[in-house]
Image (cartoon, helix red, strand yellow):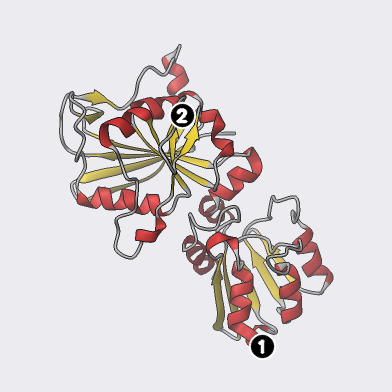
């Protein structure tokens, strides 16, 4: 059931900021009676949606939720902990405690005080991954950063003249567009903007409205309706929880040098082009410093291309 709740939460990824993309499912007498996920803009919350769907069938049931139910009042809606108590839910199974200081354990305390059985930690690792953007924002005051690179076998992102369409094939590009749809903001550097004039939209059937906000890493002015980011360290000012950095070499190098990349997604095509390399000088003084920085997370084939995903190894 927690796996189902996590899957529901993924439906809101990239659309719920500043709130987390929570999923919720209610079970009673062996039947699913309510499902919910955080809606665009952050409301209604997942629990409120699931409880509204369940109605009176929620009484005596078990509510599975990926994050602690909120306990703070808002002019946008009641606290989910209060809604759960009022519904007659008998048991709440939650993956994670909410680090937001307005809740941070208070939701669980309120449920227990009302006689609701509370279990915490089921699916915790998966929930950490699913809500990495929100959790990074709470803990570090910045969005979760994914760096995407589309490379040839020899580590190039373009021909010597700058031509880069297309390094990878249709399946890999579609996967990249799905990643865009799951992000709040997408960022490129000035070189990429000038060379490619990218639209940075989502071109997948049914997801065309999921395009993220666009940001430019620049010391100058950004185009109309683009966000300006003077340095990687300034991403704390960006809206949203998930930031996708798509390039080019200058932006990728800057974020890696600042140690602000949380996830690295490398799409590698089976071609050799001898062109422009993906990265510039990183300033490493010793090769030993490059080891043990990245943990393999996933690897898969996308048509003829391979996607390798690595997570930054942090304390």
Q: Residue at x 25, y 28 (%)?
A: 155
Task: Count how many numbered circles sit on residues in the image.
Answer: 2
Q: Nearer the viewer, residue 89 or 10?
A: 10
On residue 75, the disc is none
Q: Nearer the viewer, residue 155 or 178?
A: 178
Which element carries disc 2, helix, strand or loop? helix
Tell me, yes or no, if residue 292 can be seen here: no
Which residue is disc 1 drawn over?
56
Q: Residue furthest top?
A: 285
Q: Residue at x 46, y 29 (%)?
A: 255
Question: Residue 271 location, x and y as percent?
Answer: 15, 35
Crowd class of label 2 (few under 14; some 14 to 19; many from 20; radius 10 Å)? many
Question: Residue 2 location, x and y as percent?
Answer: 55, 66
Foreground mark, 1 or 2, reads: 2
Compared with 174, 70 (above or below) is below
Q: Residue furthest right?
A: 113
Image quadrant in which you'd find residue 151: top left
Image quadrant in which you'd find residue 253: top left
Image quadrant in which you'd find residue 39: bottom right
Which residue is disc 2 drawn over?
255
Crowd class of label 1 (few under 14; some 14 to 19; many from 20; radius 10 Å)? few
Q: Nearer the viewer, residue 217 or 104?
A: 217
Question: Residue 30 location, x and y as percent?
Answer: 56, 84
Separation of disc 1 and disc 2 at Cα? 51 Å
Q: Quadrant of the N terminus?
A: bottom right
Question: Residue 110 location, x and y as percent?
Answer: 80, 66
Q: Residue at x 21, y 42 (%)?
A: 168
Compared with 55, 278 (above or below) is above
């Amino acid at each position: 059931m927690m796996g189902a709740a996590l899957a529901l939460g993924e439906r809101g990824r990239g659309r719920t900021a500043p709130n987390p993309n929570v999923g919720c499912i209610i079970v009673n007498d062996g039947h699913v009676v309510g499902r919910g996920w955080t809606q665009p803009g952050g409301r209604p919350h997942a629990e409120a949606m699931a409880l509204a769907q369940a109605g009176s069938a929620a009484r005596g049931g078990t509510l599975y939720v990926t994050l602690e139910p909120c306990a703070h009042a808002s002019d946008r809606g009641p606290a989910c902990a209060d809604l759960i108590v009022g519904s007659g839910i008998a048991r709440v199974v939650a993956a994670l405690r909410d680090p937001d200081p307005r809740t941070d354990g208070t939701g669980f305390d309120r449920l227990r005080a009302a006689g609701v059985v509370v279990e915490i930690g089921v699916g915790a690792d998966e929930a950490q991954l699913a809500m990495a953007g929100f959790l990074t924002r709470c803990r570090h005051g910045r969005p979760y950063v994914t760096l995407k690179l589309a490379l040839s076998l020899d580590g190039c992102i373009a021909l010597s003249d700058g031509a880069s369409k297309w390094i990878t094939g249709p399946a890999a590009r579609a996967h990249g567009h799905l990643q865009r749809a799951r992000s709040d903001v997408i960022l490129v550097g000035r070189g990429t903007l000038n060379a490619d004039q990218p639209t940075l939209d989502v071109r997948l059937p049914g997801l065309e409205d999921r395009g993220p906000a666009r940001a430019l890493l620049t010391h100058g002015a950004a185009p109309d309706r683009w966000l300006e980011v003077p340095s990687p360290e300034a991403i704390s000012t960006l809206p949203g929880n998930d930031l996708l950095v798509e390039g080019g070499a200058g932006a990728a190098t800057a974020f890696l040098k600042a140690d602000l990349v949380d996830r690295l997604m490398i799409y590698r095509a089976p071609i050799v082009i001898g062109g422009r390399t993906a990265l510039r000088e990183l300033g490493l003084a010793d090769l030993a410093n490059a080891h043990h920085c990245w943990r393999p997370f996933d690897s898969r084939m996308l048509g003829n291309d391979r996607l390798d995903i690595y997570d930054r190894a942090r304390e």
